[in-house]
C-alpha cells in the first residue's frame, strides 16, 4: 500500500472516496467536490488497484488530498475501515465516485449533524444522473426477512421537512460521526461490499442512535456504475451478506419469527435455479455462520434498542420492497 499526503491539517470533515476502475465518473465527482460551498474538508481517495490510476485527477483540487493506493481490490468495507482509521476528523463522509454532489451538499449535511445531535448518520437525497425526475435513493429500509432497498418515492409532505428519520442511510453519499462509527466497530470487512452500509445502520440503531436522510443534501447518482446487482458476483455477495446481516444483528425474538419466511424465500430461489450465484453465496454464508455468530454476541451485548422499537422500524410488507417505498418520517417541520 502506497500513500501520498498533500497536507497535514485535518479539517472537520474527511470525504472518503473508494475508487475501483472509476475513470468514467471520478473526474466529475471530484469536480463537484471542488465546487462545494462548505470548505472545511479534506479528501481521502483510496484506489482499490484500478487498471488506470486516478492520481492525475487530484492535482487541481482545492481541498487537502490524501491518496492511498491498495495492492489489490479490497472491496468497499475494508477500504472504508482504512479511511476511518486514517482520519481524526469529526465527520467521515462516504462518497461514491459515481455520485455528483450539488454545491451545498456538504454544507447541508454538516448543518443537519450540528442541529440533530442524537443522529449518528445522515444520508443524501440521491437523484438519478440519467433522469432528474427519478429518485435513486431517499433513505434505506430493511424488510424483516433480509432484503434491503433504497427508497425511491418522494415523502408525501416533502415541502415541510428537511430531515427524515429512516432505518438507515446509503453509503453512496452519507455523513457519519466518526467516533460513533468507531464505537460500534465501524464497517465489517467481511462484507466486502453490498449490505455493508445496512449492517452499519443496523448496529447504529441497535446501540440507540438514529439515522436520517437530508432532503436538501442532493447528489446525482449514476447507480450501478460498477456492478450493482447486475452480475453474478453481486448476486453472490448480496445473498451471503443478507444472511450475515440477520444472524449478526437481529435480536433472537425477531430472528425466530422471521426465519421461516427467510427459509421459504431461499427454497424458492433454490428450486428456480439451484446452481445460481445467489445460491452459491448463500452456501458460503451458511458455511461461515459460526464465525459471524461470534460477532453477534458483541452486537447483542451492547444493544439498547428494544425489540418492540426495532420491530416498528423494520418493513413487514413485501410490496414496500417491490415498490421501493421510501419509509421515512419527517423530523423537523420548517415554517
Image (spheres, rainbow, N blue to C red):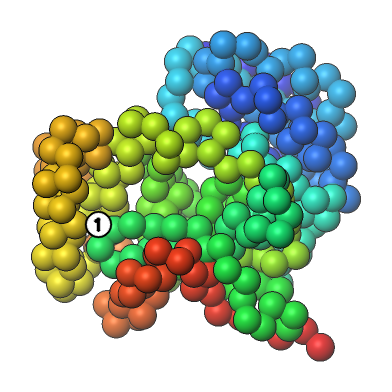
Q: Residue at x 34, y 30 (%)?
A: 233
Q: Is residue 205 visible?
A: no
Which quarter shows the C terminus?
bottom right
Q: Is residue 326 left or right of residue 7?
A: left
At 77% from the left and 84% from the top, the residue drawn is 334
User: Horizontally, is 167 left or right of 263 in the view?
Assistant: right
**SS of the residue at dot 1?**
helix
Based on the displayed image, in which of its 4 quarters is residue 194 positioned?
top left
As displayed, is residue 202 above or below residue 65? below
Image x and y of residue 204, in percent? 43, 61
Does 246 appear above or below 45? below
Spot the residue most to the bottom. Answer: 335
Q: Which residue is mark 1?
A: 246
Coordinates of residue 72 in the picture (x, y in percent): 45, 15
Quarter of the figure with residue 313: bottom left
Residue 53 visible: yes
- What is the x, y in percent for residue 149? 44, 58
- The x and y percentages for residue 159 are 75, 80
> Up-down: is 276 above or below 305?
above
Q: Residues within 10 Å of mark 1 (few under 14, many from 20)?
A: many
Residue at 37 percent across and 42 percent down: it is: 188
Please tell me which residue is depicted at 15% across the width and 72% down the height of the picture.
Answer: 257
In this view, which residue lies farthest toward the front? 272
Amino acid at each position: 500500500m502506497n500513500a501520498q499526503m498533500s497536507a497535514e491539517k485535518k479539517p472537520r470533515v474527511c470525504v472518503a472516496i473508494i475508487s475501483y476502475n472509476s475513470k468514467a465518473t471520478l473526474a466529475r465527482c471530484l469536480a463537484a467536490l471542488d465546487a462545494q460551498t462548505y470548505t472545511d474538508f479534506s479528501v481521502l481517495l483510496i484506489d482499490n488497484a484500478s487498471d488506470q490510476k486516478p492520481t492525475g485527477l487530484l492535482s487541481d483540487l482545492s481541498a487537502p488530498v490524501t491518496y492511498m493506493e491498495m495492492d489489490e481490490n479490497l472491496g468497499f468495507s475494508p477500504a472504508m475501515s482504512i479511511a476511518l482509521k486514517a482520519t481524526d476528523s469529526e465527520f467521515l463522509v462516504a462518497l461514491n465516485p459515481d455520485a455528483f454532489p450539488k454545491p451545498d451538499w456538504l454544507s447541508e449535511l454538516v448543518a443537519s449533524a450540528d442541529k440533530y445531535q442524537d443522529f449518528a448518520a445522515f444520508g443524501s437525497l440521491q437523484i438519478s444522473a440519467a433522469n432528474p425526475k427519478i429518485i435513486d435513493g431517499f433513505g434505506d429500509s430493511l424488510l424483516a426477512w433480509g432484503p434491503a432497498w433504497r427508497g425511491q418515492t418522494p415523502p408525501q409532505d416533502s415541502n415541510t421537512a428537511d430531515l427524515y428519520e429512516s432505518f438507515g442511510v446509503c453509503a453512496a453519499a452519507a455523513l457519519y460521526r466518526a467516533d460513533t462509527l468507531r464505537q460500534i466497530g465501524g464497517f465489517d470487512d467481511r462484507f466486502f461490499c453490498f449490505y455493508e452500509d445496512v449492517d452499519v445502520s443496523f448496529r447504529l440503531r441497535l446501540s440507540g442512535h438514529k439515522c436520517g436522510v437530508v432532503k436538501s443534501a442532493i447528489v446525482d447518482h449514476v447507480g450501478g456504475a460498477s456492478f450493482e446487482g447486475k452480475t453474478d458476483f453481486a448476486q453472490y455477495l448480496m445473498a451471503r451478506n443478507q444472511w450475515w446481516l440477520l444472524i449478526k444483528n437481529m435480536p433472537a425474538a425477531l430472528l425466530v419469527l422471521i426465519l421461516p419466511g427467510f427459509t421459504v424465500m431461499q427454497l424458492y430461489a433454490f428450486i428456480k435455479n439451484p446452481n445460481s450465484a445467489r445460491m452459491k453465496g448463500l452456501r458460503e454464508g451458511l458455511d461461515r455462520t459460526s464465525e459471524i455468530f461470534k460477532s453477534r454476541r458483541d452486537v447483542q451485548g451492547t444493544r439498547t434498542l428494544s425489540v418492540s422499537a426495532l420491530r416498528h422500524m423494520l418493513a413487514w410488507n413485501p410490496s414496500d420492497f417491490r415498490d421501493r417505498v421510501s419509509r421515512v418520517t419527517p423530523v423537523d417541520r420548517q415554517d
